[in-house]
Each structure stands twice: as C-alpha cells, then as structure tokens.
Amino acid sequence: MPERAPYGMLAEFENPETLVEAAKRARAHGYRDLDAFTPFPVHELEGVFALHDRRVLWLGLIGGATGFVVALGMQAFTNFDYPIDVGGRPLYPLSAFAVVIFELTVLFSALFTAIGMLIVNGLPRLSYPVFAGSRFHLASKDRFFLCVKAEDPRFHASETRRFLETLGAHSVELVPA
Amino acid sequence: MSLTAEESEHILPPQQSIGDVTDQLARIPLQFPTRRRWLIALALSSLLLLLFFVAVTVLFTRGVGVWGLNIPVNWAFAIHNYVWWLGIGHAGTLISALLLLMGREWRNSLNRFAETMTLFAVVCAGMYPILHLGRPWYVYWMFPYPATMQVWPQFRSPLEWDIWAVLTYLTVSIVFWYVGLVPDLAAARDRARRRGWQVFFGVLSLGWRGSAIHWIRWQQSYRLIAALAVPLVVSVHSEVSLLFAVSQIPGWHSTIFPPYFVLGAAFSGFAVVSMIAVAIRALFNLENLVTDDHLDILGKVLLATGLMTAYGYVFEVFDALYSGNVYDLQTVNDRFFGAYAWSYWGAVGFNFLVLQALWWRGVRRSPWALFLVSLSVAIGMWLERYMILVTSLYRHYLVSSWGVYTATFWDWATYFGTIGLFMVPFLLVIRLFPVISIFETKEILEEEQKELSRA
C-alpha cells in the first residue's frame, strides 16, 4: 500500500518564546511554507512569518460604506415615493436620517467583517490535516505547534524532522495530507 | 525586586498554569459541576418564563386593556421596562468592547458572561415594543417592504429609528459574542470525550485550529467589531432617549436626555454584571479567575457611573429651574411631591444613597455586599425609568390630560415573566458554553507570568 502524501511536519513547543525562536530559526534555515498553531494569539509571529493581510479590515470598510449608502438611499427613496408633509418639515432631513444611517453602517460593517474573516480564513472547514496530529489537541490548551508544510521546496521528511528536533521541540510528528 | 499582589498590576493569581485554566473552564460544560443548584435555578426561572407565556397569551387574547396604561399615561410599564432591560444590556458591550480597545485586561474574566447578559437583556427589551403595539402581528409594518397599501414606514420618526437601532444592536452583539466564542469552542471540542459533545463543539467551532494567520485576521475582525460596538451602544441608548426627548412632554424635552440615559444604562448594566459575577464565581468556584480585585474594580466602576447618573438628576432639575418654564417646573414639583414621589425618592435612595457604601474598600471586595448594593442599583434604576415615564405623562399641559396610572396584575406578570425570559436562556448558555473566555484568560495569565519572571 502506497504511503499517503504528507501534509507537513508538526513540532510541539512548550511556550510561545521557544515557538517564536524556532520559527525564526526555521525561516533562517530557508523554510518558507510555515504555519503555527497556538492556543491564543502570539503577536511576534506576525513579524516572523511576514504576514500582512489587511483584507478583513478592507471588507469592514466596504461593508460600512455599503450600509451608509443603503440606509441613505432607503430613507430618501421612501420619502420620495410617498411624500408626507408633516407640518412643513423637510422631506429629506439628514438629522432625522442620521440614526438609521449610523445603525446600518455599523450593522453592515460588522457583518462584512465577521463573515469576511471566516471566508478569508477558509472556515468553516471541520476537518484539516493537522487535526490528525496525536498531540494536536493540546494546541488549544497549553502547547505551541510549528508546522513545516510538505509543499515547501526544502521539505524532506527525515531531514526536517532532525532539524525541528534540534530546535528543542517537545515532540515532532509527520501528519498525512 | 519583590512585589506584593497589591503593588503589582497582576489581577490573576500567577501560580496557576494555562493548562489548568483550560481544563477548569472547559470542564464546566463538559462535566457540569453544580447540577443541583443549577437545576433549582432553572426550575425557578422556568416558572417565571411560564408566567411570561401566560401573561402574553392573556395580552394577545384580550388586548392591551389588561395592562393599566391608558391616556394620558400610555407608555408605562411597557416602555419603562424596555428602557430598563436595554440599559442593562449595554454594560456587557462596554465591558467587552470598550475595555478591550483600552487594553484593560481584567475584562478578560468578565466579558463572556457580560456579553451573554447583553444578548438576553436585549431580547427581553425587544419584546416590549412589540407587545405594546396592540396588534403585535403587524410588527412587520415597521420594515420597508413593497406593501400593497403603497405606504412606507416613516423614517422621520424616532419610533421607526428604534427598531433599526435595537435589531442592529442585537445582531452586532450576537456576532461579537460568537466571534469571541469560536476559539473557546475549539478548546472545548478538543477536551470533549463524549461523541455528542465532540459533534456539538466540533460543528460550532467551525474547525478553528488556532493557525497564526487565522489569529491575525481574527484579531483584526474582533477589534474592528469592538470599535464599531462602542459607538453603537452610545447611539442605541441615545436613540432610546430621543423617543422621549423628541416629543414635547415637559420633563422629557431636554438635551440632557441622551447622556443621562446612556450613563444610567451603563450604571444599571454594571450593577447586573456585578451580580452575575458574584453568582457565577460562587456557583462554579472561580475565585481564582474572578478575583476580589475584579469585584473591587467593578465596585469602582459602579460608583463612578452612579455618580455620573446622579449628576444627571441634578441637571434635570437645574434645566427646569433655569428655563423658568411653568410646565417644566410643575413636572419637577410633581416628581418631588406628586402622586409618584415615591418613585423619585426611591430612585435617589436606591441609586444614590446605598451606592455610597462603595467608597469602602471592604464593601467592594466582599461579594455579597457588592451583590446587595448592585441589587439596590438595579431596583433604583427601575424606579428611575418608572419616574421618568409616569411623572411626566400623568400631568402634562392640559388639565384634561391629567390622569393616574396603576400597574395591573398583568403588568407585573409580564415584567416578572421577562426575568424568566432572561434567566432561562442565560442558564442554558452557561450550561452549554465556556462561561469565562478561556483563551483570553490564558493570554493575560501568560503575559503576567512573563512579567513576573522578568521582575
């Protein structure tokens, strides 16, 4: 029976500092296709992995602009389509429209941000190769995992394993794709 | 350098490990510890919820006439409790969102149940305007849909703003709560041993795996929604106050109303958060995570927001005196000495006098003393909202529109029913989900331990 293609090599570390240090050394060693799995956000990783993704924030801005336009358009249109003269008050008062404009700006922006975050992250995706790691359940508890993916040109099963062991990994495991 | 717990900035006892905290918090839904006490609470709450269903059934079959409200006091319990419940909800968002943005990490032990409180307080609030409609089945008329009658909702009226504000607030609160919950659902999924729990948490956690890039995008979205939620809170309760202030009723038509309402909302909400914090910490033995320091801070916040609310009381009277308007002065006189003076002095007593106990550190740090002061504030704010509504309406401009109001049995039944409507889902959520944010607690614990090892 042929071996299943590997997803990557998963190394377990005991605290965020050793993980960040290991990630730096792996980058310096030439690995590029890296990922880390941590129980809470570890800010230093953003710099180490050079992760710059502002798409979620842009989606929030687009959502807000959409909400603004929808709310203004909706209120202006309903008053245009069926004008009611209330004691000579203006038909298109921005002061009266402001509340609903603000609410829908917030509503659309929040929904775009949250749904956008899930879509950009590729979630929901209930099954993922790293879940096969025998100790991976600790990634949501108190362990910090570094993964060198098999797609990395420098990936080599036995060599990568040895390299990760030299970084002080508590355990190293190959996970299938 | 050695620091005592008092001198250092540490809010959590540093000797606990992040693994222990994970197990302690994830175990609450998975191996529920206090089944008996929780079942008793659920049974009592279910009785109240049953009362709510009975009261609403009576209301729907016999009409709003079963309530005591009538011209001129046509906005009594219904809108008064609406304002009260919505105000309570606001503290949850403020704790979660405002303190997150300000980097006040002590909120990490409180935000989850405070947000949960927000969700169900808003649901209770949202019931009232619908029940008050008289023909609640026509509530969809509030939405702009192409009706065969060819009319649209009136967007120049505060009553129409209200439904947009409340529905937006409810939706954004749910989104914020859930986005913050996903990593904890994953932690619970990984701890679950029984198949049912694995599927339950597995599906709800959406396959969260704590990937570095996911955390970055998650934090961007969480902080952005928090930044949206803070002004949203202010706008929602300001909008609620505009329901009053945009009218011309003496005692309502005042520019003090938006800040006065928002501060009162935060005040009552922090009181209820304190009560829930004390109860949850006792129920689940969480003294190591909801510490006396947390109660101390909550007490201080309560005192500060209470004094700001008291400032509102002073300025409301000053406004009327300064205006010299006879109708405004008459309303002040009615509040001080009229038929409902008990609600005014009750609000002052329960909100302001009892609150002064919080100047003492011992009171702030004693769970049950803080609980009692908070209960007093919740009652005081309830009386305040009653006072604002009824004392203004029962005597306005013309003598022909003077009349008294008394709450009927069904008014009270609906009100106590909404407490069940709040408690039952709240108890279910603390049964099914991690009641304190696991990963945020670990984040601050890790940070504090690092600082301590450096010191």
Image (cartoon, rainbow, N blue to C red):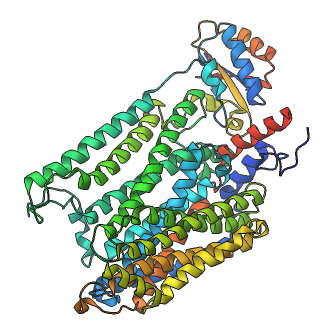
Question: Front-most of B308 and B333?
Answer: B333
How many numbered marks does the figure carry? Answer: 0
Tell me: B75 left or right of B202: left
Location of residue B402 (image quadrant): bottom left
Question: Front-most of B397 and A141?
Answer: B397
Residue B50 visible from this viewpoint = no
Residue depicted at x 63% and y 60%: B301
Q: Residue furthest toward the right?
A: B2
Question: Front-most of A163 and B136?
Answer: B136
Residue depicted at x 23% and y 63%: B157
Q: Position of residue B340 (x, y in %)?
A: 44, 89
Q: Position of residue B374 (x, y in %)?
A: 63, 72
Residue A21 visible from this viewpoint = yes
Tell me: B350 left or right of B315: right
Q: Position of residue B326 (x, y in %)?
A: 32, 82
Q: Position of residue B181 (x, y in %)?
A: 56, 48
Picture quarter with the C terminus of chain B = top right
Examine the rendered structure and indicate whether residue B350 appears above or below residue A21: below
Examine the rendered structure and indicate whether residue A16 appears above or below residue B33: above
Residue depicted at x 63% and y 34%: A41
Tell me: B405 left or right of A41: left
Tell me: A33 left or right of A84: right
Picture quarter with the N terminus of chain B = top right
Examine the rendered structure and indicate whether residue B276 appears above or below residue B453: below
Residue depicted at x 62% and y 20%: A47
Question: Front-most of B310 and B320?
Answer: B320
